[in-house]
Image: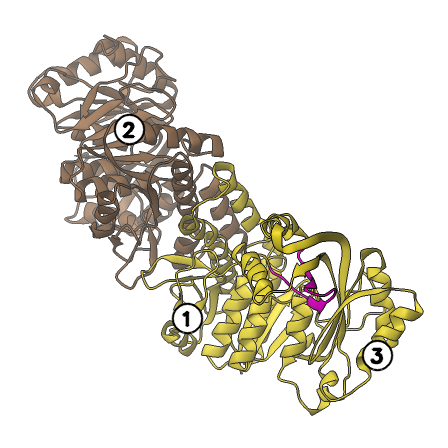
Chain colours: A brown, B yellow
Amino acid sequence: MLIVQKYGGTSVGSLERIENVARRVAKARDEGNDLVVVVSAMSGETNKLIEYAHHFSKTPSKREMDILLSSGERVTASLLAIALQEMGYGAVALTGRQAGIRTDSTHTYARIESIDTTAIRRELDKGNIVIVAGFQGINEKGEVTTLGRGGSDLSAVALAGALHADACEIYSDVDGIYTTDPRIEPKARKLDSISYDEMLELSSLGAKVLQNRSVELAKKMGVKIIAKSSFDEGPGTIIAEEDEKMEEVLVSGIALDKNQARVSLRDVTDRPGIAAEIFKRLADEQINVDMIIQNASKEGTTNLGFTVPQSELEVAKRAIESFDHDIGSADYDENVCKVSVVGVGMKSHSGIAAKAFEALAENNINIEMISTSEIKISMIIDEKYGELAVRVLHEAYELDK
Amino acid sequence: MLIVQKYGGTSVGSLERIENVARRVAKARDEGNDLVVVVSAMSGETNKLIEYAHHFSKTPSKREMDILLSSGERVTASLLAIALQEMGYGAVALTGRQAGIRTDSTHTYARIESIDTTAIRRELDKGNIVIVAGFQGINEKGEVTTLGRGGSDLSAVALAGALHADACEIYSDVDGIYTTDPRIEPKARKLDSISYDEMLELSSLGAKVLQNRSVELAKKMGVKIIAKSSFDEGPGTIIAEEDEKMEEVLVSGIALDKNQARVSLRDVTDRPGIAAEIFKRLADEQINVDMIIQNASKEGTTNLGFTVPQSELEVAKRAIESFDHDIGSADYDENVCKVSVVGVGMKSHSGIAAKAFEALAENNINIEMISTSEIKISMIIDEKYGELAVRVLHEAYELDK
């Protein structure tokens, strides 16, 4: 089997942990697998480098940031290769460039455009374990680029896709994907498997195990991801295309996102294009507008509600003030959160949403906004009820069973 | 003027010091110069990375060491570029690869083969200050190489040569080249200028300001080096081809090397080729044999004396033991040191050596071995008289004046 493994910052956070990773890699090798291992920077290193840069500038040049930040993964990759060589294994460290990872030119948030696997194939053919510095590539001018936070996941998935690997194992300090955050609901259960779409909803809704772009790419390239812990031997959670077995599951998980603020615009002039204008202005300011509700109210005006990340609320306020003449009144609420129910079973089963509303109502939790997709229901509620709502919904869908 | 500046690890040893360097670079820019700035890793970083590697292996793979070690200079280069940009200067950080530095494939101790200055020229033409990560390049396979300890000096000199720069300023924490080590002789005087050859002798004899390979390369390429401190505004010391003015100087400096051990082989079979055999064996063991004295003694045998670095004495002993049948007796002395007098004036003046012997004799310092070149006299003496000999010679040649 050809396996791509990826070890995150916590998994390689000290020399002892790198040694632990080396032993895991060696074990997989002993079992007869060909291995490409993608590593992150040692935990804390990337933040340290960002702090260094911010000592000099609040807005450091992104081109230089990429040269700066790409150094951390190079350190881990070479150390892991050295550790494996010392254990008697053939191993070679490759930088993003050497691994053939070509990206666009969006420094600090580049997209992978293609991977030339020649060098990796050559090393695999020699019998070497290939260690790749994650998070980085080069653009067409040969300049160093990085892929943004969590970019090493993206490196791993893209490599697994390009190499047609049998699996892409993503190692972190948690042992898989849970029905909900175990810190909120101790009865949360680890899932054996989950579909790409469900994972996408869960991670965009606040679950932090896997970076969303990686799941999207895995779905696109058909890469089977296995999320595992590097600190134990558990089987982890498989993230793949939904299969028959998965369809039996109605609901896979409950997610809670507390970084939400609600914006309510009342008595907005009801002229064509006004909503588009407002949302375009917000998009220009890089604000991620999430749930949107619009409904006509008094004659000639409409009400518009939506949510934005709390951290972007101040910028949103300023953007909205520029529409003074079109908006009757604006009301902002930071004390809200979004609780979501995710499951592919919703596609073919009715009554799932009703069960959520019922469960929250029974517990006197008022739902301020609702938004649904084929496989999820999201509800905006008072922030103080967030954890309670998670537990109530977890029980309502019997996720602990 | 086009100036190449190089800042060593101590000069960029903290964020505050990098800021200080940025101000110096900016000042030189304000004076109308085009600038290429080569930087080392922050002091301590390279040693930290070496320790990391040695945690895993006593003999880490050199190819991986190069990926590991080259990361430190990339960090400094990008931070300095960011600092300069924040001050309003156009600046761009280039890795060794991007700066066009091509080396041979001797990982961890590569030689620069050529420099493609296209990218640097392009950035200079745009009006940018070019910051280059020192100590690194790539080989013909595109793999990262490093140039060995002090390799950033070499990067700077090679770039100055390839760019036909007007000067190569090497900044460190000392303000120039001294007649001798000021910690030994407080009357030591900073030299205004010194010839390449004298500098070569002084640095191979123990002076540590400039790496020897860099001086050799500067001589070969005709690059004028100015050794300066990054912590004050002194004029430093110019290292260049000797000129008329220099020739007036008889002696430029006194060097002391305490890392010496004397090997005396008595009653060596006096057959053709025996000395060559012994020295070949020592060379095979990578031992740097320095001063050699041979003189016939009793009929049919000869005496052979030479020095080796103390750290290599044990290996030398083992090599010599393999010649048991050809050597009467071997005698080793670690308690010796080498004191040297260096000066281009020796070429054209007689009596300079005699003055050294006389000065030491007056102070009852016994000379065990002597070796001379066109511009230096080296003497092996009892280690305990090393500092005294430096002071005596410094006074004898009136170097404090």
Tell me the subunit letter for badge 2: A
Label 1 element class: strand
Q: Residue at x 77, y 79 (%)?
A: B251
Q: Which amino acid type is marked by label 3? A: Ala
First to last magenta residue range: B288-309
Q: Residue furthest bottom?
A: B244
Say if mark 2 contacts mark 3, CB within 8 Å.
no
Tell me the subunit letter for badge 1: B
Q: Which quadrant is home to the N terminus of chain A?
A: top left
Callout 3 environment at 10 Å: few (<14), some (14 to 19), or many (20+)? few
Q: Is residue A10 above or below residue B60?
A: above
Residue B29 is situated, as x and y percent measured from the top left of the image, at 55, 75
Q: Is residue A255 above or below residue A87?
A: above
Residue A240 is situated, as x and y percent measured from the top left of the image, at 16, 29
Residue A217 is situated, as x and y percent measured from the top left of the image, at 19, 40
Residue A339 is situated, as x and y percent measured from the top left of the image, at 28, 23
Q: Nearer the viewer, residue B189 or A231?
A: B189
Q: Nearer the viewer, residue A164 or B267?
A: B267
Q: Which amino acid type is marked by label 1? A: Glu
| Disc nearer the start of the sequence (3/1) | 1
Residue that badge 1 annotates? B113
Callout 1 environment at 10 Å: few (<14), some (14 to 19), or many (20+)? few
Tell us which disc is closer to us: 2 or 3. Answer: 3
Left or right, residue A237 beside residue B193: left
Residue that badge 3 annotates? B354
How far apart are the two marked residues, 3 and 1, measured between alpha carbons? 43 Å
